[in-house]
Amino acid sequence: MTDRLVLTGITKRYPTVVANDDVSLRVAPGELHAVLGENGAGKSTLMKIIYGAVRPDAGEIRFDGRPVQVRNPQEARRLGISMVFQHFSLFETLTVAENVWLGLDRAPTLAQVSERIRAKAGEYGLELDPLRPVHTLSVGERQRVEIVRALLTDPRLLILDEPTSVLTPQAVERLFVTLRRLADTGCSVLYISHKLDEIRALCTACTVLRGGRVTGQVDPRQQTNASLSRLMIGAEPPPLTHRERTPGRVALRVTGLSLPKGSPFGVDLHDVSLELREGEVLGVAGVSGNGQQELLAALSGEDGRAAPGTVALFDEDVSRVSPRRRRDHGLHFVPEERLGRGAVPTLPLSLNLLLTRRESLRTGGWIDRGALDTQTRAIVERFGVRAGGPGAPARSLSGGNLQKYIMGREIDAQPRVLIVAQPTWGVDVGASAQIRASLLALRDAGCAVLVVSEELDELFELSDRLVVIARGRLSPPVARADASVEQIGAWMSGLWTEAAA
């Protein structure tokens, strides 16, 4: 049987790094093939080469037995190659249907594309409104757009770069059913993920990259998480220690917060109340698009419409106080969108530090570049960020490395209150363990930490208490020791009223 894809000696060099060094890979028709590696190992670059978004410096690509030169994504799609990027390639001002239409044969009308989106999304349980503008979508909803757009091309090779990073466990299971069904039709899947359980459950082959080179090819079904970790990072991640402690005073109090949605496709917040104490982690679970964005905007100060008295920081009313004033009171915030909100893509890492840190300014407002570079280097070293130094533009980092930098920037600031959305999105197992350990260390030092995540395993690892947000309403809090994945999963559908009664 002819291999669907064969890579031989693929090499790609950049000024500061060799992203791929003599990489060879084979994928059979209908094979679910994982590509595993730590952040910066060269996985995404290799996938972009296959998809025609990056040109290799050396090597050969064969597709269905014949050599090909994939010069651009249009040629890749004509061959039958589709890709779902980790960083989404969507036009913010266009609708879902318009974004999908741009990537398809333009023979269908926009109305026909809208119907195809509804049918495909319904078939695979990926709820989508084709008429919504992309800028109104959450990260999880944008990921659904990318997945549906790829499925509509009827691919022969589907490349997925961290496809489940912001999907709920239920959505992950539906996606796996979809991928197995595709594989049964002969479609090959290249699957990049840092979630070892997923790879072992889904994939039938696995190629491991480290430092841009292939270091192993295994059947993941015959491996353990520990053995895959050793192949990927050379060691097992240290176990997470979650010590019981008594929380201190209330650091952040939300009382009866109700806010009308800020856009036609947003979510109204209804009578939201919560207390976050010093020395505790409060986890917020929920399906993407149920009010997380609106709640985070109200807590961070980006949305200043909250009624007076509804948001208090250390007993001071900050309902209509700016994000800068809230930072002055010790509240720091990590948004779920890395590029554009968490970091300015074109600015170097050192200047991105100034987005939330002002201690590197001299008297009179002049920037102390030396101090800024020193701080940046310290964060890069502490959190193992692979970058070309303080002057590297944010957009030059891989997704996982940029996430490590943004998380490190805020953790290093020693906040009194830290609000984090999707803290380990796209981060490898070693870095994920480090970020989670750093969050617990902050909590143990007395910081109040609020974590919004769609990964229930992460929330159960980190949280002292859990709440669920659904349709703009917040569930009662439940202690982690008293909660179960099944209970939280049911509450994510808004079913806590009967359960709590």
Image: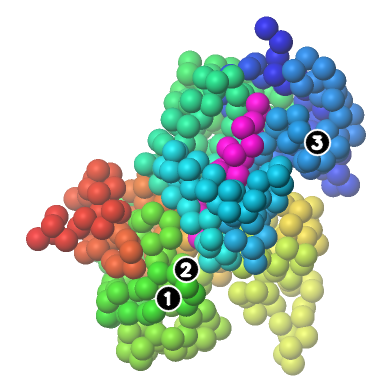
Labels 1, 2: front one = 2
Say the numbered circle drawn on residue 265: 2
| Magenta region | 138-159
Residue 438 image position (x, y, % from top left): 48, 55
At x 74%, y 18%, the residue is 64
Labels 1, 3: front one = 3
Type of amino acid at the residue the image marks with label 1:
Lys
Q: Is residue 244 visible?
A: no
Mark 1 vs 3: CB contact within 8 A: no
Q: CA distance from mark 1 to mark 2?
A: 8 Å
Residue 445 image position (x, y, % from top left): 40, 65
Q: Is residue 180 above or below residue 403?
A: above
Q: Quadrant of the C terminus?
A: bottom left
Marks 1 and 3, the one that precedes in the sequence: 3
Residue 336 image position (x, y, % from top left): 53, 60
Magenta span has 152? yes
As helix, strand or loop, the secondary structure at mark 2 comes to: loop
Say the numbered circle drawn on residue 75: 3
